[in-house]
Amino acid sequence: MNIDLYPEKAQYITGESVRIIAQLNTFSQEDGIAELKIYHLNRFIASFQMSVQEVMSFEIGEFHQPFEGFGAQLSILHNGVETAFAATAFDVVARHSQMIRYGFLSDFGSEENECADVETLRKYHINMVQYYDWSYRHDHLVSSESKYSDMMGRQVDLETVKTKIAACRQYGMKSLGYGAVYAASGTFYEKHPDWALYTAAGEPFVFINTFYLMNIAEDSPWHSHIVNEYAKAVSQVGFDGIHMDTYGFPKTAFSSTKERIRLDEEYPHLIEDTKKKLNQIRKDNYLIFNNVGNWPVQSVADTEQDAIYIEVWKPYAQYCHIKQIILEAERACRNKKQVILAAYLAPFRTDTPERALNAALLLTAAIASNGATHLLLGEKNGVLTQGYYVDHSVMTEQQSMCLRNYYDFLVRYAELLYDKSLKDVSFTHIGWDNTEYGCLTHPWSPDGKADALWLTIRENEKFKCINIINLFGCENDVWNQGKNTPVSQREVAFEVQVDRKVGGIFFASPDRGNSASQHLNYRMKDTARGIKVHFMVPYVDYWSMVYILLEENYIDLSDINEREN
């Protein structure tokens, strides 16, 4: 018996009533009882039972937490014996921007009016959706006609766009309309050559021989023009906000009057003016700006946008660069915004299904372990392999099942991955003379070296968290290449220094289906450097996580099992 278990909504706002849905591919009235159990981290919350049916809906009540993730585990019981099992997760937040899981839609023809794609995204817990290339023209976003061809010649039905927006809203998902900040058609450029950006040689900037780049400076008429176009997309089409796209170039340019323009200085004004305009239309709106190639994060990080969104390109090619980008972005925004990486995985287009999946699991683990989220998935099991979202690939059933497990995991353990109070100590608390953490049995690195365990260590006053990514058997540390299946590691020993009572040490992994926390046995030892807990991680296939729950009281000497001579 296969069970498709998922929450009714991609994400719940504080105070909303939560519903979990179970769909069975086969069932019999003799199958007995379905029991749903709800967990918060390692703690059991509640259970619900009903007779087995083909479609079951569990009303589990309201949750009033401002930011927490929960696990839901369903057992089918026949005469008290479990005959089938499934698990999912849901999170509760005060505002969607606290935890953005970004996805995409790119097909808006009349034949796409059904919303199976939105339903699929809901099951991955995608709570914010970028509508890619929905517009009539980049300089004239909303068409006066319902059906039209976009600038790339694709057919778009505006009623399809609106239908998908409504479906997203029903499932607790926000819809953002794509809009490039400076792209215009050749026709528009010919009418407004004085609005354009030019090279030092006086030639207009043009992207892929199609899009003329316009001057976004505050004193340029284009600035107010594009802000007003964004406003029309929200007010006339019904988007919840705007995804402001850039192409990463130029960094500097010239106006039609030969004035030198530094775009990193102009982008903040454009973002702020867009936000002010959206605030006039609707209070609950969302704005995301694309930092292509990690530029210009420093200048825009403090602007009124809901995330730090970075499109990752070479030379940011290695796993260590993923960590670097995230840490730099968090510092730039003073850790006040969600970091989202658009890191497109070419192996889904160029390599075998197995190696592509390995690359996706490892990259998802890498991004989540460092506190960021990943724009990768969209449409109906679609996956991005390059920057033109229309040309996405489609995952196999096995690939999609594995990615759903991973997305369940990062939702279930949201507090251990995305709480803003967590501080990364991977380079300061382990190795050399740093003995606060120790991996005693296996080669490791803090930055994703091949043939080692990649340790990301983060902590706050309540938790010490160790995320362990297995790169043994991976032939390189390049994130955008297919990977061999990592060689599974067993019995990984750790020592961690503690100065408060330990409420328990727990292990979890998304790699074997059930991501419930397991208690780990540990012993406490008094050493010259302080009191340490010693424990063993049972396995690391791709990604495993250990979290130590800290109590408020300091350690009592009676807690210590042994002392170092």
Image: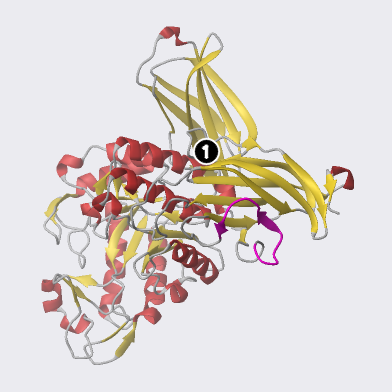
Which residue corresponds to the image point at 56% horizontal and 68% vertical from the top-left?
334
Which residue corresponds to the image point at 23% horizontal and 82% vertical from the top-left?
197
Amino acid on which the number 1 mark rests in the picture = Glu
The quarter of the image holding the C terminus is bottom right
The quarter of the image holding the N terminus is top left
In the image, the segment drawn in magenta is 431-445
Disc 1 residue crowd, few under 14, some 14–19, many 20+, Cα 10 Å: some
Q: Is residue 120 visible?
A: yes
Which residue corresponds to the image point at 30% horizontal and 56% vertical from the top-left?
177
Query: 124 or 187, which lies in front?
Result: 124
Q: Is residue 280 visible?
A: no
Chief secondary structure of the magenta span?
loop
Q: Position of residue 318 (x, y in %)?
A: 41, 64
Res 455 → quadrant? bottom right
Q: Position of residue 255 (x, y in %)?
A: 25, 87
Query: 556 or 41, which lies in front?
Result: 556
Is 407 on the left or on the right of 354, as rendered? right
Res 479 → quadrant? bottom left
Query: 323 or 243, which lies in front?
Result: 323
515 up-or-down from 242: above or below: above
- The residue pinned by badge 1 equals 16
